[in-house]
Image: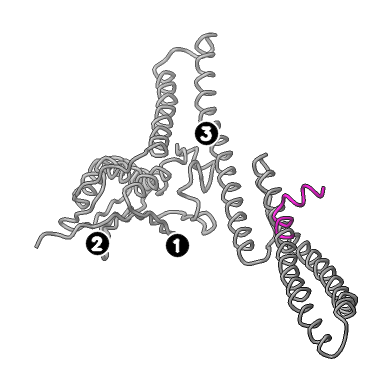
Amino acid sequence: MITRFLGSIGGRIALAAMACVLLAVGILAVGVMIVGGDLLVHLLMVHGEQATNARGMFDGTIGSVVAIAAALALLAAALLAVAVGRTLSRPVSQLDDAARRISSGDYAARVPPAAPAELASLSESFNRMAEGLAEQEQLRRDFVANAAHELRTPLTNLKGYLEGLRDGVIPPERATFESLMEETERLVRLSRSLDTLAEGDAAEEPAALEQVDLAAAVRSSVELARPSFEQRGLSLAVDVPGSLVARANPDHLAQVLGNLLQNALRYTPAGGLVQVRAVRSGGVAMVAVANTGEGIPAADLPRVFERFYRVEKSRDRAQGGAGIGLAIVRQLVEGDGGEVGVDSADGVTRFWFSLPAVASAS
C-alpha cells in the first residue's frame, strides 16, 4: 500500500515536499554547524575559553537544537504533504472510478465538485461529457426501438397477406395486391430515409454548395405538391420575392422543401391553410412553411427534429409518418451551413430554415 501511495500524485507531492525540507534543513544545518560553529568558537576563545571547551559547548547546545528542529520540520512537512497529496489525489481517483463505470456501460456515473479550481473544472467537464454520452445512448436505444417498430408493422402486414394468399383465405384480387404494394412502398420510403441519414452521418466532407435561386426552388416545389394539397381540400398560399439567391446544395434544398411540404400536407386538417414564405433577413435567406391545425405542445418542440420522434405516435403512424422527415431536414440544412427551427402557437405551426444569402449584383 505504501508503494502504491508513493507512486500516486499525492505520494510524489509528499516526496517532493520532504526533499525540499531536507535540502533546506541541510543547508541551514551546514551553515549553522560550520560557519556559526567556527564563529562561536572564535568568540569564546577571545573571552578566554579553550578551543576544545568552546567546541564542546557548541556541539552540546546548538547541534542538538538543530537536530531536533530538523526532525520536527521533516515530520511536519511529511504530514502536511500527505494531507495535501490525499486532497489532490482523491478527486483524481473519483474521476478514474467514474470513467471505469462509464466504460462498462453505467452512464449515470458522475463525480462530485472538487478543489482546487483546475480539478473542479475537470470534474465539471467530465460530468458534461457523461451527460452527453447518456443522452446519445438513450437516442441510440430509441432509434433502434423505433426502427424495429417501423419495420415490424409493414412486415407483419405483408406476412399476413402472403400467408392468407398462400392458404387461400384471401382471394388474389387487385385490392389485395394494392395493399401489398402500399406496404412495400412504405418499406422502400423508410429504407431511403435511413440511407439519407446514414449518408449524412458518414460524410467525411461537406456537401458541394453553389448559388441557388431559393425563390425559384420554393415555387417549383410548391407546384409539384399543389395537386396533393388540392386533393385534400387544403389552401396553399405562397409569398416569395422574384429572386432570392442563397448558397446551398440544390439536391438537398429540393428534399428539404419536399419534406416540409409533405409534413404540412400530413398534419393540416381538411379545409386548413398552408403558407409558404421566403424572405431575406440580414445575411441569411429564410423559408418558412406554416400550417393550421392542432399545433405542437411546447414540451415537444425541442425534440421534433429528432429521428423517429413523434408528437402523437398513434396518430402519426395512422397518417403514414415514420418520424424521419424532419430529422433529414435538420441534417441537410445544417450540413449546408444553415439552421432550422419550429414554433407553434394559436393553432398555427411554423417550420423554418435559413441558409447563407448571397448579395445580389448591383
Residue 175 placed where, x, y %?
41, 20
Q: Is residue 224 left or right of residue 199?
A: left
- Residue 280, numbered label: 2
Place residue 231 in its image quadrant: top left
Q: Nearer the viewer, residue 237 or 7?
A: 7
- Which residues make up the magenta segment? 1-14
Distance Cα–Cα, label 2 vs label 3: 38 Å
Q: Is residue 13 magenta?
A: yes
- Up-down relation of residue 275 to residue 177 (above or below): below
Tell me the amino acid under the disc marked 1: Ala
Q: Nearer the viewer, residue 199 or 233?
A: 199
Tell me the amino acid under the disc marked 2: Arg
Instruction: Please give the name of the residue rendered at 35% of the width and 46% of the height, measured from the top-left corner.
Output: 335
Q: How many marks?
A: 3
Residue 137 placed where, x, y %?
58, 42
Q: Nearer the viewer, residue 45 or 293?
A: 45
How many neighbours does mark 1 have within 10 angstroms: few (below 14), some (14-19), or many (20 or more)? few
Residue 362 placed where, x, y %?
9, 63
Q: Secondary structure at mark 3?
A: helix
Q: N-terminal of the two: label 2 or label 3? A: 3
Given contact means CB atoms under 8 Å apart, are the residues at marks 2 and 1 in contact?
no
Instruction: Please give the name of the residue rendered at 58% of the width and 47% of the height, measured from the top-left corner.
Output: 133
- Up-down relation of residue 54 to residue 180 (above or below): below
Applied colour scheme: one colour
Tell me the amino acid under the disc marked 3: Ala
